[in-house]
Image: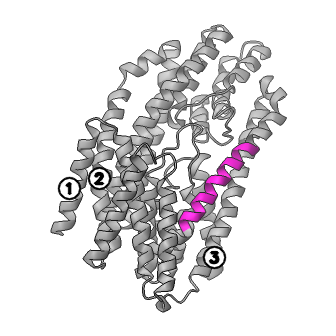
Amino acid sequence: MSARLEALVRLMAVQASYTYERMAGIGVGHAATPLLRDVFAARPARERREAIARSADFFNSHPYLAGVAVGAVVKAERDGLPGLVISRLRTALSGPLGSLGDQLIWAGWVPALIGITLIAAPSLGIWAIVALLVVHNTLRVWISAWGLDLGLREGLGVGAALQRSWLPLGALEAQRAAALAVGAALPIVASRVLTPATSTAAAAAVAAGIIGAALTVVPATRSRITGLRLGLVFVGLAVIAAGVLR
Amino acid sequence: MSEAFRLLLLLLWGTMAGLDLVSVPQGLLSRPLVAATVAGLIAGDLAGGLMAGMVLELYALDVLPIGASRYPDYSVAAVAAGTAAALVPSAVAAGVAGMIGLPLAALGGWTLQALRRRNAASVRRRLDRVAAGEARAIWELQRNGFFRDALRSFGLALVGVGAALLVAQVRWDLFPHARLVSWAVLAGGIAAALGGAIRSAGRGARRYWLACGLATGILVVWFR
């Protein structure tokens, strides 16, 4: 297995030893190690060890884009830049890679794909789920490889290269698609669960949901009221009611 | 398929779904829609699992797993919910999914924090070796983190699938209004997904896209 491929495989488990102190730092160090071994093959072992130690420091980004930092750091080490400069590069990349990745992936393509699958699943059943997994994981592997290669090519200039790339616009478009897909999925899922409820019961459930949504958005209540907490309260009340009305 | 084998598969699937959430490979196996549907398939009722997955997915859409944020873990919870939904009458499937899945998601979120604290203690024990750039120490941390998460997920799956089997023993025909619970779970799901979508959309044009989506969904339901 080539060092690049090994790094790519290791990037799939970049958060395996995730902590609040170092975030994904250890995982990033683990992913960078095969590439650093190659870079430092003809150089003193001490230099390689210093580079590995630097690569395992605190690091936080979106896991799918961690390869960008791995690649950039390895390129910087290959170019023989001072350790302090490389550490600063990691720190500088942390914020943008986290922010762009969260917008593109967690708030963009994942909810978009989930929304589409929620719409399709009642008709397509398990095949909708299979399609979701194939599409998502193809994109996931592709973006990890793309990020690693971008970092390996650009090194210190990777920040500017990221801004020039398709990512910022892609994140915006993905979030629009997510808003559209989730919005369309909501009434379809509701209708599926509420069949065959009476119109009064359906209206009551939807009204409770809308009021609950407002409570999770309004600044005065949103820090205390989450979807999960509301759900637990609603379920608790319904279990009591179902028991009493037995 | 024997019952023991089915149970083993469910526990294995629960462990895989739990691992997928954070550790490896983050390939959406942990999404409730996937985890619960596959659990339903294993338990013998795909439609029940799908129903559980759809309602719990509404809750998961509210979660943004950003940085150090703390969030519920719907992965193993969905496996248990999908199992339970597959074993009860379809009229109460969504309700039972919520009764099992929501508390387990809260418990799962707590175990994630405990896992991260254990991982941090593990790093501290090897700090000198990591600072010295010892690749072996980094590999050990990754391996141990993986196994810790697998153990966490397996434990949650054991609790969740056990609870699902218990709930399946309830005589639901004695509760003529049990459907109320399904509607309550849906109401919470709408609150979560809609609230999350509004917050995520911010004040810009994405609100219009959300409104367009809602209008499209309503039209589809209306004319179906």
Q: Marks 3 and 1: CB-CB under 8 Å?
A: no
Q: Considering depth in this image, is B82 or B199 the residue closer to the camera?
A: B199
Q: Say what amino acid the circle numbered 1 marks.
A: Thr
Name the residue beneath numbered marker 2: A183
Q: Say what amino acid the circle numbered 2 marks.
A: Gly
Q: Quadrant of residue B218?
A: bottom left
Query: What segment is highlighted magenta in the picture?
Result: B101-118
Q: Is residue B183 above or below residue A34?
A: below
Which chain hosts label 1? B
Q: Earlier in the sequence, mark 3 or mark 1?
A: 3
Q: Considering depth in this image, is B99 or A23 the residue closer to the camera?
A: B99
Q: Which residue is the extreme one toward the bottom?
A: B174
Name the residue beneath numbered marker 1: B216
- Image location (x, y in percent) of residue B219: 17, 61
Q: Are marks 1 and 2 on the same chain?
A: no
Q: Which residue is the extreme one toward the left?
A: B223
For the residue labelled by badge 2, is the local secondary structure a helix, a strand or a loop? helix
Q: Is residue B202 above or below residue B132?
A: below
B152 horizontally vs B104: left or right = right
Q: Which residue is the extreme one toward the front?
A: A220
Q: Quadrant of residue A185?
A: bottom left
Q: Are marks 3 and 1 on the same chain?
A: yes
Q: Marks 1 and 2: CB-CB under 8 Å?
A: yes
Asked whether the viewer can see residue A136, the reply is: yes
As drawn, the label of residue B5 is 3
